[in-house]
């Protein structure tokens, strides 16, 4: 029986360990990076761009090809009274081609591929920052709701204590049943709000678990219970580090390269080729006159190897204006990219300015909420003492408790909102790492 009980206790401990996890913000970020599908796709895109760059660089190297053919031709070919037999003729060869000049296509192709790789790295950084922002938001919200649960639990204890005091006062005929009814009603309201907050906390923990890739049944508990608020220092509105800006700038680089690639279609192509071919099993059959004047049949078999070196130049003469039209098209696409950069720069500058304002106002709201809570807390202690000494009414005490609860809730919301504003400011300035 003791062994069975021990096994059940051990199972319970293991189950609890699996179902409940206390994590810091950094731990949540790390888990989110490990389990994010978007980051995996960004990593795949980076690897693909790396392959594209390597392929582009290989275009500078010569191409080597080997070939082999087997020929069976019929009928035989008559050549000067003899027959050439091409049944079972085999040919094998190897060739090497080195491009010498292709109008800058290879160089521009390499630079475009390198830009593509840089874009994939920027996109990965952008994905990470958005991931961090989502995790931070969920983490801070979870802390806020958890603090509200604690606050409501403390508020409930205050009301339960007051309920006991009033019950004692009723027995001493110093309070009425109406007073007790008011407290009971207030207590029910607190319990209702507490239940809502507890349900909200479960949803917040589930959202946080989803962001970090944990099991939704796990209970994720933030290791932090107090949000540290520091006064904002000098807030920069520089957006040069923002990934969106960098991607738009890289897009302009690609469009500029594309114009050069289109112009290269009208330039000559120079290449050097070298090769060696071997041909065998060619037969010649016929009759030849010998010294005695008679004709005798003969068969000759030819096997021959041939090497060659060739310099080729290909000059485009007429493409009916295709290159010119494609170049103009690429220029228009470049202009569109430049306009996109100008437009989005303005929008992002407005966004940054708004986050700076939000952060500044958020800190002022936090200071106001903190001062309001300190006053409400001091007022509650004073009213509680006065009520115990019968120097104030029950209404005054209930009002003080309600004010305490509201100011405490405001402080929690102000702290949370400031931290969310702080993360958002770092994201929109490209400095959320």
Image (cartoon, rainbow, N blue to C red):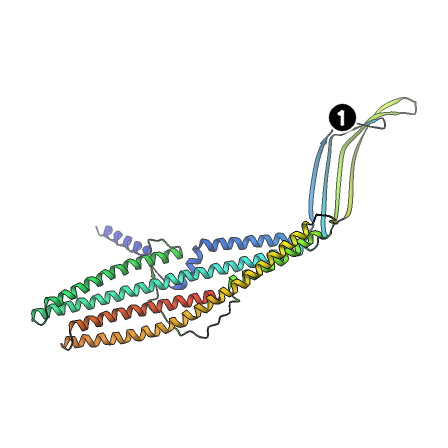
Percent across and percent down for residue 233 are: 44, 75
Position of 6 with respect to 110 (left or right) is left
Percent across and percent down for residue 344 are: 51, 62
Which residue is rendered at x = 79% and y = 30% of the image? 283
Percent across and percent down for residue 335 are: 60, 59
Q: Is disc 1 surrounded by few (<14), some (14 to 19) or many (20+) residues within 10 Å? A: few
Position of 384 with respect to 249 (left or right) is left
Which residue is rendered at x = 78% and y = 41% of the image? 306
Looking at this view, is 16 or 384 the one in front? 384
Q: Is residue 250 above or below residue 297?
A: below
Q: Secondary structure at mark 1?
A: loop
Percent across and percent down for residue 19 are: 32, 55
Q: Is residue 120 above or below residue 162?
A: above
Looking at this view, is 16 or 344 the one in front? 344
Considering every residue shown, the one lying at the far right of the view is 292
Looking at this view, is 203 or 360 the one in front? 360
**Which picture quadrant has residue 159?**
bottom left
Position of 212 with respect to 60 (left or right) is left
**Which picture quadrant has residue 90?**
top right
**Which picture quadrant has residue 85?**
top right
One can see residue 302 in this view = yes
Position of 206 with respect to 34 (left or right) is left
One can see residue 254 in this view = no
Q: Is residue 314 above or below residue 242?
A: above
Q: Which residue is mark 1?
A: 75
Which residue is rendered at x = 65% and y = 56% of the image? 259
Looking at this view, is 217 or 104 the one in front? 104
Picture mark count: 1
Which residue is rendered at x = 20% and y = 67% of the image? 157
């Amino acid at each position: 029986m003791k062994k069975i009980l021990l096994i059940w206790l051990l199972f319970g401990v293991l189950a609890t360990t699996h179902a409940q996890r206390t994590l810091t913000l950094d731990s949540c970020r790390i888990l989110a990076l490990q389990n994010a599908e978007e980051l995996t796709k960004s990593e795949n895109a980076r690897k693909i761009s790396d392959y594209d760059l390597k392929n582009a660089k290989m275009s500078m190297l010569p191409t080597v090809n080997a070939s082999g053919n087997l020929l069976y031709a019929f009928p035989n070919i008559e050549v000067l009274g003899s027959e050439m037999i091409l049944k079972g003729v085999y040919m094998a060869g190897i060739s090497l081609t080195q491009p010498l000049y292709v109008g800058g296509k290879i160089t521009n192709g390499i630079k475009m591929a390198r830009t593509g790789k840089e874009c994939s790295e920027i996109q990965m950084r952008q994905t990470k920052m958005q991931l961090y922002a989502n995790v931070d938001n969920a983490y801070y919200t979870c802390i806020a709701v958890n603090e509200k649960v604690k606050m409501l639990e403390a508020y409930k204890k205050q009301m339960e204590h007051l309920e006991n005091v009033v019950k004692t006062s009723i027995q001493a005929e110093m309070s009425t049943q109406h007073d007790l009814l008011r407290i009971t009603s207030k207590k029910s309201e607190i319990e209702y709000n507490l239940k809502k907050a507890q349900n909200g906390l479960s949803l917040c923990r589930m959202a946080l678990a989803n962001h970090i890739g944990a099991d939704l049944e796990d209970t994720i508990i933030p290791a932090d219970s107090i949000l540290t608020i520091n006064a904002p220092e000098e807030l920069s509105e520089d957006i040069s580090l923002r990934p969106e800006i960098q991607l738009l700038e890289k897009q302009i680089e690609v469009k500029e390269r594309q114009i050069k690639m289109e112009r290269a279609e009208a330039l000559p192509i120079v290449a050097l080729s070298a090769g060696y071919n071997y041909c065998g099993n060619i037969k010649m059959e016929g009759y030849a006159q010998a010294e005695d004047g008679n004709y005798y049949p003969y068969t000759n078999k030819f096997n021959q190897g041939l090497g060659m070196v060739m310099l080729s130049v290909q000059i485009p003469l007429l493409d009916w204006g295709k290159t010119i039209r494609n170049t103009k098209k690429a220029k228009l696409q470049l202009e569109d990219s430049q306009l996109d950069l100008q437009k989005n720069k303005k929008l992002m500058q407005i966004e940054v300015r708004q986050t700076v304002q939000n952060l500044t106002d958020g800190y002022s709201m936090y200071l106001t909420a903190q001062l309001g809570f300190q006053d409400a807390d001091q007022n509650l202690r004073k009213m509680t003492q006065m009520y115990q000494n019968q120097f104030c009414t029950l209404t005054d005490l209930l009002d003080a408790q309600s004010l305490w609860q509201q100011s405490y809730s405001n402080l929690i919301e102000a702290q949370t909102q400031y931290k969310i504003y702080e993360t958002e400011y770092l994201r929109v300035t490209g400095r959320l790492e």
